Amino acid sequence: DGARLKRLVGGEDAKPSEIFYQASLRVDDYHACGGIIISDKHILTAAHCVAGLFTDPYDDLVIATGARTLYDGNLHNVFNVTWHRDFINDNDHVWFNDIGIVT
């Protein structure tokens, strides 16, 4: 019938002002991964979202903040991408040390 399925039982829609800390990592104008704003210059994300996928000057990766949808928000250039040195991106270890920082 085209109706959206609810994925949370008993959940409530969040107001945009309640998720001010959320960021979107976007590649070629599409949402690729989420992140959390931890300072005015740093986004915390998962290493599997960034490890080995991008190279300096990071022109194909931007951060969106203040977005109400996956396609709006304030866009910010990326200057550096780092991840935990012990992160291993394979099926057996993907969730271990899965942390990265985007600046």
Image: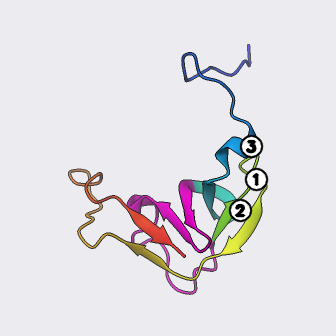
- Ranked by sequence position, the earlier of labels 3 and 2 is 3
What residue type is disc 2 on?
Answer: Asp
Spot occupied by residue 29 in the image (x, y as percentages of width and height): 71, 62
| Residue marked by disc 1 | 71
What residue type is disc 1 on?
Answer: Tyr
Residue at point 29%, 51% (across, down): 95
Spot occupied by residue 1 in the image (x, y as percentages of width and height): 73, 13
Q: Position of 84 compared to 102: left or right?
A: left
Is 30 situated above or below 84? above
Magenta stretch bounds: 33-61
Q: Nearer the viewer, residue 25 or 90?
A: 25
Q: Are marks 1 and 2 in contact (CB under 8 Å)?
A: yes
| Residue marked by disc 3 | 16
Q: CA distance from mark 1 to mark 2?
A: 7 Å
| Residue marked by disc 2 | 29
Q: Residue furthest left?
A: 92
What residue type is disc 3 on?
Answer: Pro
Q: CA distance from mark 3 to mark 1?
A: 14 Å
Q: CA distance from mark 3 to mark 2?
A: 21 Å
Membership of 42 in magenta stretch: yes
The image quadrant that residue 73 belongs to is bottom right
Q: Nearer the viewer, residue 78 or 16?
A: 16
Is 26 situated above or below 15? below
Helix, strand or loop at label 3? It is helix
Is 103 situated above or below 89? below
- Report the label total: 3
Membership of 43 in magenta stretch: yes
Residue at point 41%, 75% (across, down): 82
Q: Nearer the viewer, residue 69 or 54?
A: 69
